[in-house]
Image: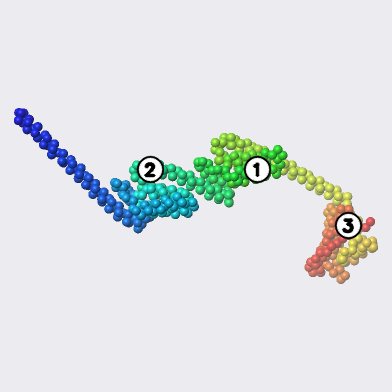
Amino acid sequence: MNTRSMLFGLMLLPLSCAIAIPTAAQTAKHAAGSRQVADEASRRQLAAYLADFQKTPDDATLRNEIVELAKTINPAPAIPDLARANFTQATAQVNGAVAPEEYKAAAKLFEQAAVQAPWYADADFSAASAYSKAEDYDDAKRNLDFYLAAVRPGGDIQKAENLRRDLDAQQATQQFQQTLQQFVSNPSDTVRMGIIRQAQTMKPAPEIPEEARGHYVMAVVLATSSEGSPEDEQHAIEEFKAALLAAPWWGDAYKKLATAQTAAGKYDDAIATLNFYLLAQPTEARNTQDEIYRLKALERKAADEQAKQQTEEQQRLSLEDKKRAERAAIDGMNVSVEGKWYQASTPNVYFAGGQSNPECDYVVKQSGGRWSITNGCSKSSRAIDNIEVQPRQLSFRLSGRDSGFPYSEVDITLTLSNDGQTLEGRGNAYDKNFFPLGDHPVRWLRRD
């Protein structure tokens, strides 16, 4: 290449550079203009969405679209004056609130500010905080979700995470107290186990109520008294149970109750109590399970002893019955219904004779294993038959067909007195058609 060509090339280089620089600037300017146009279009779209949202503030999909669109706009869309005014008023209400209803009213005002500007993340967080103070944890979490959706990149989410942890703890405590109230009004093992499991998930663990501590201390005193009686043991058990009604998650109280029940010989109850203790204190599983095995062994031993005692008692009662029967037989042999008897002064016309008429006595005797009753004054038309004699008892039938005997039959049962001097009982009479006429007292006295 010659010298002129080289010079010509060097002259063209600055010229080409001068031409390239204005082209890059124009490109940047064009890009900025495009962004501005797009930003203006996004803002117009946001305004249109917002107008629709004011008519349907419960439209979750539209709210989400507004929030996501607002995040793409830089700088962030302005907060309307009405939303800021509501926010300021709600903040003042929160600062002066003391009752749950007052915090809830402020929370609703924060929610109105968020409806006027769904990208207003501070309004969502403030609503969540106010609902938390009103103990409305579901609405608090709902607004906290709105905050996390609306916060712009780089925004503070740590305070939201802290608030969520607080809400979870507060809600768990609220649910725990509700379950506890249900248990106190209607105790059941199922609810008790649920409370124990729920208490183990709570950090910190629920405090033991003063009512429970009062019952617990009284129970310990009764259970450890040097002069403890069965009544004291039972009272201690009742006081431990009262403590566990007020604090059903209290592991130490279950252990003490099981010890008192074991001392009282209530092994079944003690095993059931230790199962609750095992649930409340899982770290003591090995020792507790071994204690349950020990109580089952004691329970079996006690059952065997009780069965032995029952067998011995049954044998004793059977022996006593046998002795009573033997004595009765001996008494029946020593004191017999044999002899002469006269009718005592009872108002009936069944029998003849009386104390002043010995010739009309009723003679009861046994001959050849057969019993007979005779009376020399009775008419021949009257018969005494169906005679049965048991130890200390005599029964027979008196029948007749003459006109002076208005009954067709009288069935008599008499019992011998302990001294052997009296036969006393009832006579059931029947008329000539064998229709029952009722019963009457009968009393015979032994003729000396």
Identified by mark 1, the residue type is Met
Is 129 left, or right, of 153 in this rendering?
right
Q: Residue at the location (9% across, 32% down)?
A: 10
> Comparing marks 1 and 2, which lies closer to the viewer?
2
Query: Would you name the residue on which mark 3 appears?
Result: 422
Q: Residue at the location (32% across, 56% down)?
A: 51
Is 65 left, or right, of 405 in this rendering?
left
> Comparing marks 1 and 3, which lies closer to the viewer?
1
Tag of residue 386: none
C-alpha separation, residue under disc 1 versus residue under disc 2: 53 Å
C-alpha separation, residue under disc 1 versus residue under disc 3: 65 Å
Q: Position of residue 196 (x, y in %)?
A: 54, 43
Determine the residue located farthest toward the bottom in the rendered image: 403
First in sequence: mark 1 vs mark 3: 1
Query: Would you name the residue on which mark 1 appears?
Result: 218
> Comparing marks 2 and 3, which lies closer to the viewer?
2
Query: Would you name the residue on which mark 2 appears?
Result: 156
Q: Position of residue 312 (x, y in %)?
A: 74, 42
Residue closer to the observer: 404 or 440:
440
Within 10 angstroms of label 1, few (less than 14), some, or many (20 or more) residues?
Answer: some
Mark 1 and mark 3 in contact? Answer it, CB < 8 Å: no
Mark 2 and mark 3 in contact? Answer it, CB < 8 Å: no
Is 162 left, or right, of 206 in this rendering?
left
Identified by mark 3, the residue type is Thr
